[in-house]
Image (tube, rainbow, N blue to C red):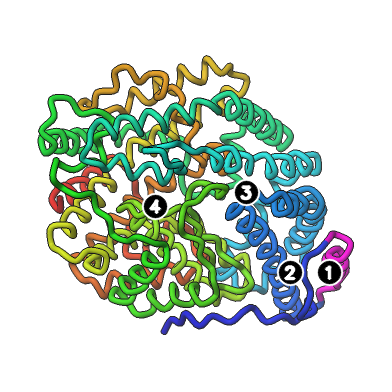
C-alpha cells in the first residue's frame, strides 16, 4: 500500500531546470499566478496545484541552504547563501503569498471545492491573512538570520578530556563512565564551557525577544505568546490547557520521576545522587555502546525498522541511497538533531550528532519516525496538505521510539544490554516531562513580560525549575550552572513555544504503545493511516485516525503514567 519509492513532484508550471537563484528570476512566476483569471472550479484547482509546485521548489531550496549551513557552520559561503534567502528572497515572497491567499478566498468558485478536503487548508489560509503585516517582513527576516546564531555559538563549544578535544555531544559519553570522578570532571567542564558564552547568548536572546514582541504588537496582539499560538495554528487548545498540563506533570509525573531516581541511587549504591550520576551504571557495568560509527548506526536502524515493517526500513534505505543523512558529531557542526522534509523531492534529510551512546539510538529512531511521516504525507497533492500539526508530527517520532524497542536486539547482542536499553528508554519517556513543563512555563512568562532584565529572567527560571525538581538528586553547589541551564535549549532561540508539543505527543505515543502491546499490526496500521493524512484533518481527527483521544487532561495523564509504571 505504501512505498518508499517516492517520485519527485512533476513540474507543469515551472521549467524543469529552474533553480532558485535570486528574486528577479523568481518573481515572474508569482506575477503570473497573481494575474491569472480563474474561470471555473477546475481552473481554481489547477491554479492551486501551480502555487503548490512553486511553494515546493522554493521551500526545498530554503531547506537545503539551512541543511548545508548546519552541517558546516564554519563555512562562510554556506552561511551567506542561507542569509541571502532570508533577506533577499523570502521578504519579497511574503506580499505575493498574502495577495495569492486573498485571491483564493475571494474566488467565486471557492464554495465548489470539496469543503471537507480543503477545510484545514482554507483555515490556515485565513489564519495567514489575519497575521500578515507588511511592516513585519523586515523584522521576520532579521529574526530568521539571528536564530541561526545559536547553532554557530554552541556548535563551536569544545572541551578537553584526557588530553583530547570533544564537542559537548561527544563529551557526554563520559557521563556514562563508571569512574565517578571522571563523570563529575566532565560534567563541570561542559557546564563551565557553556558559561563562557553566557553573555553572548543572553544578548542574542534579548534581541530575539524584542524583535518577536514587536512583530506581535504590529499584528495587533497583546504579546508574542498569543501571536505565536495563532501562528503555530493551535486551533484545538489554549494557554489554559498548557497550564493544566504543567499542573498534571507536578501531580502525576513527579512522583514517578522520584521513584526512578530513588531506584537509580540504590542501584549505584550512593548516599547522594548527583546530576553527573544520572546516566551512570553500577561499577563493573559497561556503558551501552550500541554502535561505533554513524554508518553502523544507520545500518542497524534500517534493519530494526525493516523488522518492524519492511516499508519503514525501505524509507531509511532510500534516504541512504540519496545521501540524505548526516549523523556523526564533529566540530563546526550545529548541535541537536532534526528531520527536514523536502517538499519537492519527497525523501527528507536527517541531521544529528551521534557519539556512540544509547541516547543516539533514541534520537535516530525518533527522527526516523519523522522521516516515515514525510514519506507517508508526500503523495498528497498540495504542499499545504503536507503541513501537518507538530502535535501529530511528534507522535510519529515518539511512538516510533517505543514501537522500535521490540526489535532493539538489532543494536544489542545480549539480553542484559537489551533490558538495560529498554529500561533507559522508559525512564527517559517519563523524566522528559518535567523539562517540557519547565521550558513551556518559562516561555509564557518571558513573552508576557518582554521588558524583563537578565536578573529577573534568571530568578523566574530558577523558580520554575524549582517547581519541577525531584526530591532525590542533590544539586547543592551547582547554582551557577543551573541558573544558566535554559541556554542549552535550542527551541527557545530557534522555534519559540515549540516544546509543549513534545509533552502532548509523548502522551499520544504512550497511547499508541498501549495499542501496540494489544495488537501490533493494528497499531501500526492506525499509525500509517493517521500520518498519511498529513494536515488534511484537524488535530483531534488525526488523533482519532491513530486510534487516540486528543486529551492531555490530568485524568488522562494519570492513566498513561500508571501504564508506563506497570511496564517498567
Q: Residues within 10 Å of mark 4 (few under 14, many from 20)?
A: many
Q: Is residue 448 visible in this depiction of the protein?
A: yes
Horizontal placement of 428 versus 147: left or right? left
Is residue 143 or residue 487 the one in the foreground? Answer: 487
Q: Are marks 1 and 2 in contact (CB under 8 Å)?
A: yes
Looking at marks 3 and 1 on the same chain, the residue that comes earlier in the sequence is marked by 1
Q: Please name the residue shown 32% across and 59% down the image.
A: 401
Q: Please name the residue shown 35% across and 68% down the image.
A: 301
Q: Which mark is residue 29?
A: 1
Q: Quadrant of the N terminus?
A: bottom left
Marks 1/4: CA–CA distance: 45 Å
Q: Which mark is residue 73?
A: 3
Name the residue carrying label 4: 355
Looking at marks 4 and 3 on the same chain, the residue that comes earlier in the sequence is marked by 3
Q: Position of residue 194 (x, y in %)?
A: 48, 30
Marks 2/4: CA–CA distance: 39 Å
Looking at marks 2 and 4 on the same chain, the residue that comes earlier in the sequence is marked by 2
Q: Are marks 4 and 3 in contact (CB under 8 Å)?
A: no
Q: Are marks 3 and 1 in contact (CB under 8 Å)?
A: no
Name the residue carrying label 2: 54
Horizontal placement of 508 versus 90: left or right? left
Residue extent of the magenta highlight: 22-38
Q: Position of residue 458 (x, y in %)?
A: 48, 19
Marks 1/2: CA–CA distance: 8 Å
Q: Residues within 10 Å of mark 2 (few under 14, many from 20)?
A: many
Q: Please name the residue shown 85% across and 72% down the image.
A: 36
Q: Position of residue 465 (x, y in %)?
A: 37, 26
Above/below status of 62 relative to 520 = above
Between disc 1 and disc 4, the foreground one is 4
Amino acid at each position: 500500500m505504501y512505498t518508499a519509492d517516492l517520485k519527485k513532484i512533476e513540474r507543469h508550471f515551472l521549467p524543469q531546470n529552474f533553480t532558485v537563484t535570486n528574486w528577479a528570476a523568481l518573481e515572474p512566476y508569482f506575477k503570473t499566478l497573481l494575474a491569472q483569471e480563474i474561470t471555473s472550479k477546475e481552473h481554481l484547482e489547477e491554479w492551486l496545484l501551480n502555487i503548490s509546485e512553486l511553494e515546493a521548489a522554493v521551500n526545498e531550496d530554503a531547506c537545503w541552504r539551512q541543511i548545508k549551513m548546519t552541517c558546516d557552520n564554519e563555512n562562510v559561503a554556506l552561511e551567506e547563501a542561507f542569509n541571502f534567502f532570508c533577506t533577499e528572497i523570502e521578504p519579497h515572497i511574503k506580499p505575493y503569498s498574502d495577495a495569492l491567499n486573498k485571491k483564493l478566498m475571494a474566488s467565486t468558485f471557492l464554495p465548489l471545492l470539496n469543503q471537507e478536503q480543503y477545510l484545514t487548508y482554507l483555515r490556515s489560509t485565513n489564519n495567514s491573512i489575519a497575521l500578515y503585516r507588511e511592516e513585519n517582513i523586515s523584522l521576520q527576516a532579521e529574526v530568521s538570520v539571528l536564530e541561526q546564531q545559536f547553532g554557530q555559538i554552541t556548535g563551536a563549544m569544545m572541551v578537553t578530556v584526557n588530553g583530547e578535544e570533544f564537542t559537548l555531544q561527544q563529551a557526554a559519553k563520559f557521563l556514562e563512565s563508571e569512574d565517578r570522578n571522571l563523570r563529575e570532571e566532565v560534567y563541570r567542564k561542559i557546564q563551565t564551557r557553556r558559561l563562557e558564552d553566557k553573555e553572548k547568548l543572553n544578548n542574542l536572546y534579548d534581541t530575539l525577544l524584542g524583535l518577536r514582541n514587536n512583530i506581535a504588537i504590529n499584528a495587533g496582539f497583546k504579546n508574542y505568546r498569543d501571536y505565536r499560538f495563532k501562528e503555530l495554528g493551535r486551533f484545538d487548545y489554549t494557554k489554559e490547557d498548557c497550564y493544566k498540563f504543567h499542573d498534571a506533570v507536578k501531580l502525576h509525573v513527579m512522583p514517578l520521576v522520584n521513584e526512578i531516581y530513588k531506584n537509580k541511587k540504590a542501584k549505584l549504591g550512593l548516599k547522594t545522587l548527583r546530576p553527573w550520576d544520572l546516566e551512570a551504571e553500577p561499577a563493573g557495568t559497561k556503558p551501552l555502546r550500541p554502535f561505533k560509527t554513524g554508518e553502523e548506526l544507520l545500518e542497524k536502524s534500517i534493519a530494526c525498522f525493516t523488522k518492524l515493517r519492511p516499508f519503514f526500513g525501505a524509507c531509511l534505505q532510500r534516504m541512504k541511497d540519496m545521501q540524505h543523512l548526516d549523523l556523526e558529531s564533529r566540530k563546526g557542526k550545529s548541535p541537536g538533531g532534526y528531520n527536514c522534509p523536502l517538499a519537492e523531492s519527497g525523501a527528507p534529510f536527517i541531521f544529528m550528532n551521534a557519539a556512540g551512546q544509547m541516547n543516539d539510538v533514541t534520537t535516530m529512531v525518533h527522527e526516523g519516525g519523522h522521516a516515515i511521516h514525510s514519506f507517508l504525507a508526500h503523495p498528497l497533492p498540495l504542499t499545504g496538505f503536507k503541513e501537518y500539526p507538530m502535535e501529530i508530527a511528534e507522535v510519529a517520532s515518539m511512538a516510533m521510539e517505543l514501537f522500535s524497542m521490540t526489535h532493539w536486539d538489532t543494536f544489542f547482542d545480549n539480553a542484559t544490554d537489551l533490558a538495560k536499553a529498554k529500561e533507559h528508554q522508559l525512564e527517559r519517556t517519563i523524566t522528559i516531562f518535567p523539562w517540557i513543563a519547565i521550558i513551556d512555563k518559562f516561555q509564557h512568562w518571558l513573552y508576557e513580560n518582554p521588558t524583563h532584565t537578565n536578573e529577573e529572567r534568571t530568578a523566574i527560571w530558577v523558580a520554575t525549575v524549582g517547581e519541577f525538581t525531584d526530591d532525590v538528586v542533590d544539586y547543592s553547589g551547582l547554582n551557577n550552572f543551573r541558573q544558566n541551564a535554559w541556554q542549552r535549549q535550542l527551541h527557545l532561540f530557534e522555534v519559540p513555544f515549540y516544546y509543549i508539543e513534545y509533552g502532548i505527543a509523548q502522551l499520544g505515543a504512550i497511547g499508541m504503545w498501549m495499542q501496540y502491546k494489544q495488537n501490533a499490526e493494528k497499531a501500526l496500521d492506525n499509525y500509517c493511516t493517521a500520518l498519511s493524512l498529513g494536515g488534511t484533518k484537524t488535530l483531534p481527527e488525526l488523533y482519532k485516525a491513530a486510534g487516540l483521544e486528543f486529551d492531555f487532561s490530568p485524568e488522562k495523564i494519570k492513566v498513561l503514567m500508571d501504564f508506563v509504571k506497570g511496564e517498567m
